[in-house]
Image (tube, grey):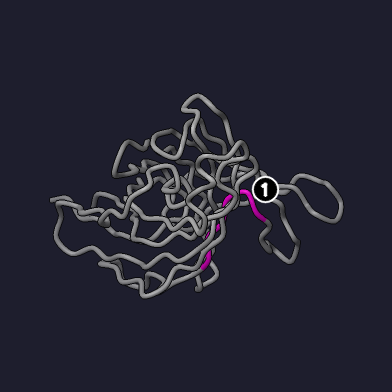
Amino acid sequence: MRKFVRLSLVAGATAAVIGGAMVAGPTFAAPGGGECQLDGTADFGPGPGVDPSATFAYGFQGTLSGCNSSESGAPAGGNIAAGKTITYNGATVILPQATGTGSCATGTTAGTAVAQWNDGTTSVIDYTTTSAAAGVALQGTVVASATGTDAATGAPVTITTDRYLGDGAAGLLAFEVSDPTQCNTPGGVTTAGIQGVTGIGHQS
Protein backbone atom coordinates (compact mmCIF):
# COMPACT_ATOMS: atom_id res chain seq x y z
CA MET A 1 0.00 0.00 0.00
CA ARG A 2 1.29 3.43 -0.91
CA LYS A 3 1.02 6.08 1.75
CA PHE A 4 2.00 9.68 1.09
CA VAL A 5 2.85 12.44 3.52
CA ARG A 6 2.09 15.70 1.73
CA LEU A 7 3.71 18.89 2.91
CA SER A 8 4.28 22.11 1.07
CA LEU A 9 7.41 23.07 -0.83
CA VAL A 10 8.27 26.41 -2.19
CA ALA A 11 10.34 25.39 -5.06
CA GLY A 12 7.86 24.85 -7.80
CA ALA A 13 5.81 27.83 -6.75
CA THR A 14 8.47 30.15 -8.01
CA ALA A 15 8.41 28.59 -11.43
CA ALA A 16 4.62 28.89 -11.59
CA VAL A 17 5.23 32.40 -12.83
CA ILE A 18 6.23 30.86 -16.13
CA GLY A 19 2.99 28.95 -16.56
CA GLY A 20 0.64 31.92 -16.32
CA ALA A 21 -2.50 30.26 -14.99
CA MET A 22 -4.34 29.26 -11.84
CA VAL A 23 -4.18 25.50 -11.40
CA ALA A 24 -5.27 23.03 -8.75
CA GLY A 25 -3.06 21.44 -6.13
CA PRO A 26 -1.61 17.97 -6.64
CA THR A 27 -3.57 14.83 -5.89
CA PHE A 28 -1.82 11.68 -4.70
CA ALA A 29 -3.53 8.33 -5.28
CA ALA A 30 -3.11 7.20 -1.70
CA PRO A 31 -5.02 7.03 1.58
CA GLY A 32 -4.45 9.73 4.16
CA GLY A 33 -1.97 12.45 3.35
CA GLY A 34 -2.03 16.16 4.01
CA GLU A 35 -1.10 19.49 2.55
CA CYS A 36 -0.02 23.05 3.33
CA GLN A 37 -1.03 26.43 1.99
CA LEU A 38 1.81 28.36 0.39
CA ASP A 39 1.94 32.15 0.20
CA GLY A 40 5.05 33.91 -1.05
CA THR A 41 6.80 36.18 -3.52
CA ALA A 42 9.24 35.48 -6.34
CA ASP A 43 11.78 38.05 -7.58
CA PHE A 44 13.46 37.81 -10.99
CA GLY A 45 16.57 39.36 -12.48
CA PRO A 46 16.10 39.26 -15.37
CA GLY A 47 12.69 37.65 -15.62
CA PRO A 48 10.71 35.71 -18.21
CA GLY A 49 9.20 37.73 -21.03
CA VAL A 50 8.39 37.05 -24.68
CA ASP A 51 11.43 35.07 -25.86
CA PRO A 52 11.00 31.32 -25.21
CA SER A 53 14.77 30.79 -25.43
CA ALA A 54 15.70 33.50 -22.91
CA THR A 55 17.43 32.57 -19.65
CA PHE A 56 16.56 34.07 -16.28
CA ALA A 57 17.30 33.78 -12.58
CA TYR A 58 15.05 34.08 -9.54
CA GLY A 59 14.73 33.91 -5.79
CA PHE A 60 11.71 33.09 -3.65
CA GLN A 61 10.51 33.35 -0.07
CA GLY A 62 7.21 32.18 1.36
CA THR A 63 5.29 30.86 4.34
CA LEU A 64 3.70 27.46 4.80
CA SER A 65 0.53 27.32 6.90
CA GLY A 66 -2.42 25.10 7.75
CA CYS A 67 -0.37 21.94 7.17
CA ASN A 68 -1.86 18.55 7.93
CA SER A 69 -0.33 15.15 7.43
CA SER A 70 -0.85 11.44 7.86
CA GLU A 71 2.52 11.32 9.64
CA SER A 72 2.37 11.64 13.42
CA GLY A 73 4.26 14.67 14.72
CA ALA A 74 4.61 16.37 11.33
CA PRO A 75 5.02 20.17 11.53
CA ALA A 76 2.00 22.40 10.93
CA GLY A 77 3.88 25.10 9.00
CA GLY A 78 7.13 26.90 8.40
CA ASN A 79 9.07 29.04 5.96
CA ILE A 80 10.70 28.19 2.65
CA ALA A 81 13.13 29.93 0.32
CA ALA A 82 15.26 29.58 -2.80
CA GLY A 83 17.82 32.14 -3.97
CA LYS A 84 17.29 34.33 -0.89
CA THR A 85 18.83 34.76 2.57
CA ILE A 86 17.80 32.60 5.52
CA THR A 87 18.93 32.28 9.12
CA TYR A 88 20.58 28.90 9.70
CA ASN A 89 22.38 27.91 12.91
CA GLY A 90 22.55 31.57 13.91
CA ALA A 91 24.13 32.76 10.64
CA THR A 92 22.63 34.72 7.77
CA VAL A 93 23.07 32.44 4.76
CA ILE A 94 22.65 33.34 1.08
CA LEU A 95 21.06 30.53 -0.93
CA PRO A 96 22.03 29.96 -4.59
CA GLN A 97 19.62 31.46 -7.11
CA ALA A 98 17.46 29.19 -9.21
CA THR A 99 17.63 29.45 -13.00
CA GLY A 100 15.32 28.89 -15.92
CA THR A 101 14.78 29.13 -19.65
CA GLY A 102 11.55 30.29 -21.28
CA SER A 103 8.88 32.94 -21.55
CA CYS A 104 5.74 33.91 -19.68
CA ALA A 105 3.94 31.19 -21.65
CA THR A 106 6.27 28.21 -21.36
CA GLY A 107 9.58 27.25 -19.78
CA THR A 108 11.67 25.09 -17.49
CA THR A 109 13.49 25.88 -14.25
CA ALA A 110 15.78 24.16 -11.76
CA GLY A 111 16.98 25.03 -8.29
CA THR A 112 17.28 24.15 -4.63
CA ALA A 113 14.80 25.24 -1.97
CA VAL A 114 15.18 25.10 1.81
CA ALA A 115 12.10 24.47 3.97
CA GLN A 116 12.52 25.43 7.63
CA TRP A 117 9.65 23.85 9.52
CA ASN A 118 8.24 25.38 12.69
CA ASP A 119 9.44 22.44 14.80
CA GLY A 120 13.06 23.44 14.04
CA THR A 121 13.72 20.82 11.35
CA THR A 122 14.92 21.45 7.80
CA SER A 123 14.32 19.94 4.35
CA VAL A 124 16.56 20.70 1.36
CA ILE A 125 14.75 20.12 -1.96
CA ASP A 126 16.36 19.80 -5.38
CA TYR A 127 13.69 20.42 -8.01
CA THR A 128 12.85 21.00 -11.64
CA THR A 129 9.72 22.48 -13.16
CA THR A 130 8.14 22.37 -16.59
CA SER A 131 5.42 24.75 -17.72
CA ALA A 132 3.13 24.72 -20.74
CA ALA A 133 0.00 26.73 -21.39
CA ALA A 134 -2.18 26.49 -18.26
CA GLY A 135 0.06 24.73 -15.78
CA VAL A 136 3.42 24.12 -14.17
CA ALA A 137 4.53 20.66 -13.08
CA LEU A 138 7.05 20.36 -10.26
CA GLN A 139 9.16 17.29 -9.54
CA GLY A 140 11.85 17.08 -6.92
CA THR A 141 13.59 15.15 -4.17
CA VAL A 142 14.51 15.96 -0.59
CA VAL A 143 18.31 15.69 -0.60
CA ALA A 144 20.89 15.44 2.16
CA SER A 145 22.32 18.96 1.97
CA ALA A 146 22.97 22.14 0.03
CA THR A 147 25.71 24.77 0.19
CA GLY A 148 25.00 28.42 0.87
CA THR A 149 27.24 31.40 1.60
CA ASP A 150 27.70 33.12 4.95
CA ALA A 151 26.59 36.71 4.30
CA ALA A 152 29.08 38.11 6.83
CA THR A 153 32.22 36.16 5.99
CA GLY A 154 31.69 34.76 2.49
CA ALA A 155 32.49 31.27 3.75
CA PRO A 156 30.51 28.26 2.49
CA VAL A 157 27.77 26.95 4.79
CA THR A 158 26.35 23.43 4.56
CA ILE A 159 22.59 23.26 5.14
CA THR A 160 21.57 19.75 6.22
CA THR A 161 18.24 17.94 5.88
CA ASP A 162 16.88 16.39 9.06
CA ARG A 163 13.27 15.80 7.95
CA TYR A 164 11.83 13.92 4.91
CA LEU A 165 15.22 12.90 3.48
CA GLY A 166 14.74 10.93 0.26
CA ASP A 167 11.06 11.82 -0.16
CA GLY A 168 9.77 12.88 -3.57
CA ALA A 169 8.11 16.22 -4.31
CA ALA A 170 5.28 17.15 -6.67
CA GLY A 171 3.13 20.21 -7.16
CA LEU A 172 0.91 22.44 -9.28
CA LEU A 173 0.74 26.12 -8.31
CA ALA A 174 -0.54 29.57 -9.24
CA PHE A 175 0.90 33.06 -9.56
CA GLU A 176 -0.11 36.73 -9.68
CA VAL A 177 1.93 39.25 -11.67
CA SER A 178 1.04 42.77 -10.54
CA ASP A 179 1.90 44.20 -13.98
CA PRO A 180 1.19 41.67 -16.77
CA THR A 181 2.57 44.09 -19.38
CA GLN A 182 6.04 43.18 -18.09
CA CYS A 183 5.74 39.96 -20.09
CA ASN A 184 6.17 42.14 -23.19
CA THR A 185 9.11 44.22 -21.96
CA PRO A 186 12.86 43.51 -22.44
CA GLY A 187 13.44 42.93 -18.72
CA GLY A 188 10.49 40.58 -18.35
CA VAL A 189 8.62 39.95 -15.10
CA THR A 190 10.34 41.41 -12.03
CA THR A 191 8.15 40.10 -9.22
CA ALA A 192 5.09 37.91 -8.67
CA GLY A 193 2.99 36.61 -5.81
CA ILE A 194 2.81 32.84 -5.44
CA GLN A 195 -0.02 30.85 -3.87
CA GLY A 196 -1.00 27.20 -3.95
CA VAL A 197 -0.52 23.71 -2.60
CA THR A 198 2.40 21.33 -3.20
CA GLY A 199 3.53 18.09 -1.63
CA ILE A 200 6.20 15.71 -0.40
CA GLY A 201 5.50 11.99 -0.57
CA HIS A 202 6.99 8.67 0.46
CA GLN A 203 6.10 5.02 0.48
CA SER A 204 5.56 3.17 3.73
- Mark 1 residue element: strand
Give the residue type that dot 1 points to. Thr
State which region is magenta. Answer: 79-84
* 133 vs 171, nearest the viewer: 133
Overall secondary structure of the magenta section: strand
Residue at (57, 40) in percent of width and height = 185
Residue at (70, 63) in percent of width and height = 89
Tally the marks: 1
Q: Is residue 51 above or below residue 167?
A: above
Residue at the disc numbered 1: 158
The reply, left or right, for residue 41 in relation to residue 130 is: right
Binning the other alpha carbons within 10 Å of mark 1 as few (below 14), some (14 to 19) or many (20 upward) gives: some
Q: In this view, does 99 lie above or below 168?
A: above
* 201 vs 129, nearest the viewer: 129
Residue that lies at the very extreme toward the right in this rendered image: 153
**Does the magenta segment cover residue 108?**
no
**Does the magenta segment cover residue 80?**
yes
State whether residue 162 appears in this view: no
* 41 vs 68, nearest the viewer: 41
Give the image location of residue 47, x and y in percent.
58, 41
Residue that lies at the very extreme toward the top in this rendered image: 53
Give the image location of residue 116, x and y in percent.
54, 63
Residue at (53, 53) in percent of width and height = 161
The reply, left or right, for residue 163 in relation to residue 171 is: right
Residue at (72, 55) in percent of width and height = 93
State whether residue 52 appears in this view: yes
Give the image location of residue 193, x and y in percent.
49, 60
The quarter holding residue 145 reads: top right
The quarter holding residue 196 reads: bottom left
The reply, left or right, for residue 200 in relation to residue 162 is: left
